[in-house]
Image (cartoon, coloured by chain):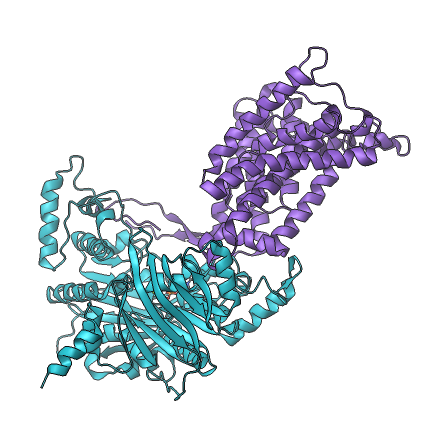
Chain colours: A purple, B cyan
Amino acid sequence: MTVVEAPAERRWRWPIEIRLEPRLSQPAWLGFGVSLGAVALALVLGGVVLKLVGGDPVRAYLYMIRASFGNLGVISDTITKATPLILVGLACALAFRMRLWNIGAEGQFFAGAFGASAVVLTPLLAPETPSIWMIPAMILAGFVAGALWGFLPGFLKARYNVNEIISTLMMNYIAVAWNNFFIFAVWTEGGFQMSRVFPKTAWLPRLADYAKEIREFRGLTAHLGLVIGLLAAVIVWWVLFRSKWGYEIRLIGDNPKAARYAGVNIVRNTVLVMMLSGGLAGLAGMSEISGVVHRLQGAISPGYGFTGIIIAWLAKLNPLAVIPVSVLFGALILAGREIQPSGVPKMIQGIVLVCLIASELMIRNRIRFIFRPVRS
Amino acid sequence: MVVESHAVEMRGVTKRFPGVLANDAVDFDLRQGEVHALLGENGAGKSTLVNILTGLYRPDSGAILVRGTPVSFHSPRDAIRHGIGMVHQHFMLVPTQTATENILLGLSEPRFWMALSRYNQVIADLGEQFGLTVDPGVKIWQLSVGEQQRVEILKMLYRGAQVLILDEPTAVLAPQEVEELFKTVRSMAQGGKSVVFISHKLHEVLSIADRITVLRKGKVTASGLNTAGTSKAELARLMVGREVLFHLEKKQRTPGDVVLSVEGVQALNDKGLPALRGVSLTVRSGEIVGLVGVAGNGQAELAEVITGLRRLTSGSIRLHGEVVVQERETRRDDFLVRRIIDSGVAHIPEDRTHVGTAPNLSVTDNLIMKAYRQPPVSHGWSINASVARSRAESLRSEYDIMTPSVETPVRHLSGGNLQRVILAREISARPRLMVAMQPARGLDVGAIEGVRRLLLEQREEGAAILLVSEELEELMELSDRMYVLYAGEVMGEVRQADAATIGLMMTGTRLADLSVSVGTKP
Ligand SMILES: Nc1ncnc2c1ncn2[C@@H]1O[C@H](COP(=O)(O)OP(=O)(O)O)[C@@H](O)[C@H]1O
Ligand SMILES: [Mg+2]
């Protein structure tokens, strides 16, 4: 509480004073409830803006909801969009827990995509290799490539105290350029800036693949990457909150001096966490390549890696909360594609973000209204 | 007799926070020109009471009268308008601005043009009047904590405060600075101002206050006692609610084997300058060895070297005769720290919040900080959450840690409870050597007694204890032997010595030289 006193007498004052008092305890439901409230408020505010510019907010919202949750087909598309977001969100949440500011999930995503592609295109495995070998090999390669991309900044940080914000950011550009080199020069398909299409054995199974058995699945794009993402979320949660290693990560993140005092190996953990974080983002790249794009090309990410940073914060660095937040973002991206020219979803996204960040204040503090007697 | 109205009177003030009754029908009155101490343990409700008085909190019920007229404050601004100003424990100054700029901040005069040199003079004169020497033109960050506190006091005086509230002003001060603050407080009282002096330290209250009001758990247990008519023991009883033993019984005990031996240790401080210049000492099992010295003479560095947190440049550390830290150590720090922890060394660090605990982690997580690597807390790669929890629950009741639950982040705990968390963790590991840095600093009398009792129990159980403290009295009371440290060197080892001799050693005279001069006396 900063208090500034001015002795000057003022005649008139607001009859109500609003004051924030810090909360001593935060019940578990509070964060969830407040976040939900913030999203609702954001939608109302967005509606007001829409109304002011002459739009019809109700129609716009209904349209957006229909565009992302309206039928099985678009729900599946939303989930497909959410899949890479879950993985990059986890990557950021994990690193941020240790206060390692990995903003290189984008680069690690590209590295993962490259690693997975290399299995198919080099080719490390022949095209006729059955999926049961091909897919795990690609998962492994994607994870390892992402982890290597995380290793370098992690090592530099641990060993020479190089600021990871700068190094991970720079590594993003390298990853993109590296990929470009391969799609322009090495794996180019008849002069186009993309590789040839992967053989079917390198595709992650989609719901649509089972349309013969279950008719409702026809045309559904959701793929096995979702399962990878959900599994990863549970595993990261377990690691952070139930394992010795996760305890060390949380301890270092909260107070590195206490960690040192407890004999925790900070150097090793810095490298390992950056590698796991990079690996998760690499898996996102793999899942996108093998589940959606089916070839290596330039435009495989509309900035997933950076969205992951936002998702991690909105999920309050909780791996399980990353899942619903990612679905929300997936929906917004999808709705954005539907009514792109209006820019409405972008605006909504922005307002949701601002409201959620501001709601942090409500979680840490309680609001008191103080009614003053009106004086003459 | 003329009925004079009090400078401030609070009647039946009640304030409830979720789960606690912070003030329970508190009556408090402040006479003009007196120093009135508000005494109570941490959490007794002292800050809450004065926050209500200055309009920061609103009372749930009760009345406040200033010079006989009822008032209702909504903000500190209202309070200062009625001449009531408060200096908080945590200062509210802008580090990059000068003292004068900070004092003028938020005032409507000067309006636009800051004739700073003129104001500098005004403020310097004001300071002069009350013995508050501070250069008004110097930026806050260049000032010591004591000087910053003076700026805060000046800020209130400049705003016309007639009543000054000082919330635990001595908590941040060095002993000499405390003396200067006391002079200022006395001169303010002589100048007709009334001072509310908050503290939990008995000797301070006894030496500065005219009258004393004691709070315990939100209730007044003694109202406006005359200082002359009371005693340390009585105040302690009022404050804690039971007899407090200032002198604990120390059982006779023959020390056992040497547990720790420090041999010719040299080490650098954080700035890379020599902090330890060849320190040698031993601690045996079943004895408390005190390390005497003014802060900054190498105590902190020595504790860090022993616990593996700081490299030594020469010499060695042995535990049970085995070298654990040596010159030109090639093994990593964290390895050394773990090895030292595993060989039974507990460490109560000087800095509770920055080293000893992780503020946002739960009480449970903080209690397993040293035990999470071994079963039963660990189970393979995982941590056995139910074992950790039940361990935390039992430590919580055994060590009387006041917390809503073991899941509460420790940043919500008071200083005394935080220290209990650390003590519980370190003692429950059944250490063979305990390095205790200022274990009782900043605690109130009841808690200090508890800490001392725990240390003596450890001694009884055969632990070797190296105790660092700045309270000479405490060291003389608890220690079996003492070493005096000055500028990184041991001035000598003393068993029983008078404070004067130790005082000389603390300022750099070797015991050997002293005994020569003492010896030549007739
Ligand atoms: N803003 C607050 N919200 C909830 N509880 C509080 C708040 N401030 C103080 N308390 C509680 O009120 C009690 C009295 O606190 P305080 O007045 O700060 O004690 P003291 O200053 O005597 O150490 C404590 O139990 C404390 O936890
Ligand atoms: Mg207080």
Q: Quadrant of residue B296?
A: bottom left
Query: Measured from the top left, where is residue B436 in percent x and y?
Result: 39, 70
Nearer to the camera, B79 or B284 = B284
Query: Measured from the top left, where is residue A203 in percent x and y?
Result: 78, 29
Query: Measured from the top left, where is residue A344 in percent x and y?
Result: 58, 25
Q: Is residue B388 in view from this perspective? A: yes
Instruction: Report whether A99 appears left or right of B58.
Output: right
In the rendered image, the vertical position of residue B401 relative to residue A110, given as above or below: below
- Image quarter (top left, top right, bottom left or bottom right) of the C terminus of chain B: bottom left
Identify which residue is drawn at 21% across, 65% down. Answer: B178
Query: Measured from the top left, where is residue B460 in percent x and y?
Result: 45, 83
- Image quarter (top left, top right, bottom left or bottom right) of the N terminus of chain B: bottom left
Instruction: Report whether B137 appears left or right of A136.
Output: left
Nearer to the camera, B315 or A352 = B315
Nearer to the camera, B430 or B249 = B430
Q: In which quarter of the image is residue B205?
A: bottom left
Q: Is residue A283 in view from this perspective? A: no
Ligand 1 lies in which image quarter? Answer: bottom left
